[in-house]
Amino acid sequence: MREFVALLAEELQTRCRAAGLRIGAVSTHGNDESPRSVAFTVSGAVSAALAGFVGTHVLVARSSRRGRRARKRWFAGVSIHAQQAATAVAEIRPDEVEVTASRAGGPGGQHVNTTDSAVRVRHKASGISVRVAGERSQHRNRSVALTRLRELLGEREQRERAERAKRRRRAHYQLERGGAVREWHLDERGAGLRPA
């Protein structure tokens, strides 16, 4: 009875609006009438508004589509996940990095031994550093190092985003069937929920 998931999501959204919270984007997995899961963003103190709703919910009802010996209990889980702001690493501000110059060494004649053309760029917040000594110009080495640092920070953000998505997905499948936080029944019309 996947309709329970949709009805529970509507109930939670109604409670959030009643608490003065703003509902943002709503996404469903499956069709809209009977989704497998529903996720929506809420702006405000969501933890306080939904404190008694986090956990397993159970619907106790007989399905009209099944026989007398049909299942009478359906379970759904509610969890709150902090939304991470998308950090754009396209531009790195000068105050976010520490740039040091050194002698490049290696082949290249006297020029390499007399100028500080190698560059090390370290991102202060993450500690990631890149050293470039391939070009003869310090300015070019600095440009190449900043480009590589942007790439590394982008890869790191992508890994973190994938890990957050993996944790949310794992939480989706960790539904405990016992010890429900709320028990629900269908209303008289069978189109809404009422607490048990």
Image: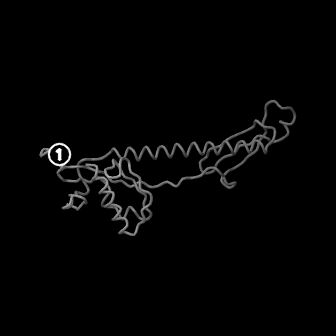
Place of residue 104 in the rendered image (x, y in percent of width and height, measured from the top left):
78, 37
Give the residue drawn at x 26%, y 54%.
57
The kind of secondary structure element at disc 1 is loop
Q: Quadrant of residue 54?
A: bottom left
Please give left or right for residue 150 compared with residue 191 in the image.
right
Specify the color scheme: one colour
Between 148 and 96, the residue placed more toward the observer is: 148
Place of residue 45 in the rendered image (x, y in percent of width and height, measured from the top left):
41, 65
Going by the numbered disc 1, the residue's amino acid type is Arg
Count of numbered marks: 1
Please give left or right for residue 125 compared with residue 104 in the image.
left
Q: Residue furthest right?
A: 110
Quarter of the image with the C terminus in it: bottom left
Please give left or right for residue 93 compared with residue 71 in the image.
right
Place of residue 30 in the rendered image (x, y in percent of width and height, measured from the top left):
36, 47
Q: Quadrant of residue 194?
A: bottom left
Place of residue 44 in the rendered image (x, y in percent of width and height, measured from the top left):
43, 65
Give the residue drawn at x 34%, y 64%.
14
**Against 83, is 161 above or below?**
above
Q: Residue furthest left?
A: 68
Give the residue drawn at x 34%, y 44%.
173
Please give left or right for residue 97 compared with residue 196 in the image.
right
Q: Quadrant of residue 107?
A: top right
Few, some or many residues within 10 Å of mark 1 (<14, 14–19, 20+):
few
Residue position marked by numbered label 1 in the rendering: 66
Give the residue drawn at x 76%, y 35%.
134
